[in-house]
Amino acid sequence: MSADTAYELLKRGESFLRGRNPAQAAIILQRARNQEPERTSIREALGRAYYNSGRYDLAAEEFRFVADRYPTNGYAHYCLGRCGEKLGDELLSRRHFRLAAAFGYERE
């Protein structure tokens, strides 16, 4: 097993995200989350990887974790809204798009 730190794994996972390889990013970021499960930067990146892989339910769990710890994080609420759209959950979508806007993150 590799002795990579959670930070190194986060950076590698983000690199895979930038390279448009979200499935590989998710694998790496899951390892980072296992090392530091409370680190919201890892959870947010993992949420993006899941979302970009079409795994919207898992993405929503990660973004919900971030939003629960940082309720004024407009980006996390926006991402939850996007997940709600993809999952067909209009209530989740509307609620979190409103919260995102209230915290200064406008829908694209």
Image (cartoon, grey):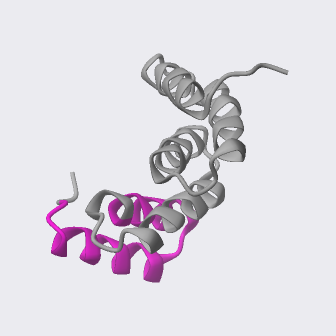
Q: Residue lying furthest right in this view?
A: 1
In the displayed structure, 89 sits above or below 56; it is below
Magenta stretch: includes residue 93: yes
Where is residue 90 shown, x and y percent of the image? Answer: 45, 78
Q: Residue at x 66, y 29 (%)?
A: 28
Q: Residue at x 44, y 70 (%)?
A: 69
Total residue callouts: 0
Q: Where 68 falls versus 10 (above or below)?
A: below
Which residue is more in the foreground, 38 or 86? 38
Residue 104 at what x, y percent from top left? 14, 64
Q: Is residue 52 left or right of residue 58?
A: left
Q: Is residue 51 above or below residue 12?
A: below
- Residue under the image location 46 percent in, 64 percent down: 85
Q: Where does the N terminus fall, quadrant-wise? A: top right
Choose between 19 and 91: the one closer to the eye. 19
Q: Which residues are magenta?
A: 77-105
Find residue 107 and report its horizontal and vertical position in percent: 22, 58
Q: Quadrant of residue 95?
A: bottom left
Is residue 20 found left or right of 100 in the rendered image?
Answer: right
Up-down relation of residue 99 to residue 81 (above or below): below
Q: Report the magenta stretch's main SS.
A: helix
Q: Is residue 79 magenta?
A: yes
Residue 55 locus on image (x, y percent): 64, 49
